[in-house]
Image: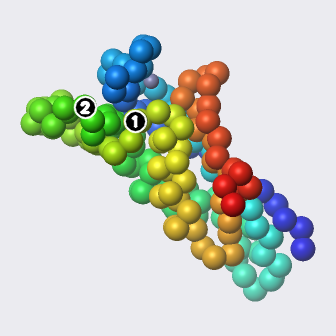
Amino acid sequence: MEKIRLTKEFHFEMAHALWNYNGSCKSIHGHSYKLFVTLIGTPISNTQDPKNGMVADFSDIKKWIKAPVLDKLDHALLIANEADAKGLSTISQMFDKLKIVDYQPTCENLLIDIVGTVKPLLPEYLSLHSVKLCETATSYAEWFASDNQ
Ligand SMILES: [Zn+2]
């Protein structure tokens, strides 16, 4: 059976600040992130199956990613737990989605976090092939299953 890679693209807006960094991402600011989730599998070959001919329904991929990833990150502010950011959470008028994470919220670490969230949610017949997270129009990080076996 032929293996096919299937990619769904998502967008979200998120703010972060990099603790103890020596560049412009040290200050709280936002990015328009693009996320590409690529699954690999074999198209269903069963005329009785409503998903016949599909590796996965694109709308199902959206469902798997939306609540656990997009809804949590969109318009959130991510701050490393090393920063004394707890005071920010007391300003409820400004920070409804303040996430204090146990990692430096770089594009790379955010990608690892997203991969860890998505992998267990996929049905057994699908594998996560790769995930690409674009922080800007010209900068992105990629995770490949083949690099992490
Ligand atoms: Zn940044």
Q: Which mark is residue 10?
A: none
Q: Secondary structure at mark 1?
A: loop
Q: Position of residue 50 (x, y in %)?
A: 70, 77
Observer-nearest residue: 52 or 12?
12
Q: Which residue is mark 1?
A: 104
Q: Position of residue 49 (x, y in %)?
A: 72, 82
Q: Residue at x 54, y 38 (%)?
A: 108
Q: Residue at x 46, y 26 (%)?
A: 31
Alpha-carbon distance for marks 1 and 2? 10 Å
Does residue 124 appear to the left or right of 12 in the view shown?
right
Does residue 134 appear to the left or right of 79 in the view shown?
right
- Please identify the quarter of the rendering in which residue 34 is found: top right
97 up-or-down from 26: above or below: below
Residue sitting farthest toward the right: 1
Residue sitting farthest toward the left: 90
Q: Position of residue 24 (x, y in %)?
A: 42, 13
Q: Which residue is mark 2?
A: 83
Instruction: State which image quarter holds ligand 1.
Output: top left
Q: Residue at x 32, y 36 (%)?
A: 80
Does residue 46 appear to the left or right of 33 in the view shown?
right
Mark 2 CB lies closer than 8 A to ligand 1: no
Mark 2 residue crowding within 10 angstroms, few (<14) / some (14–19) / many (20+): some
User: Can residue 114 be seen at all in this image of the molecule?
Assistant: yes
Which image quadrant: the C terminus? bottom right
**Amino acid of disc 1:** Gln
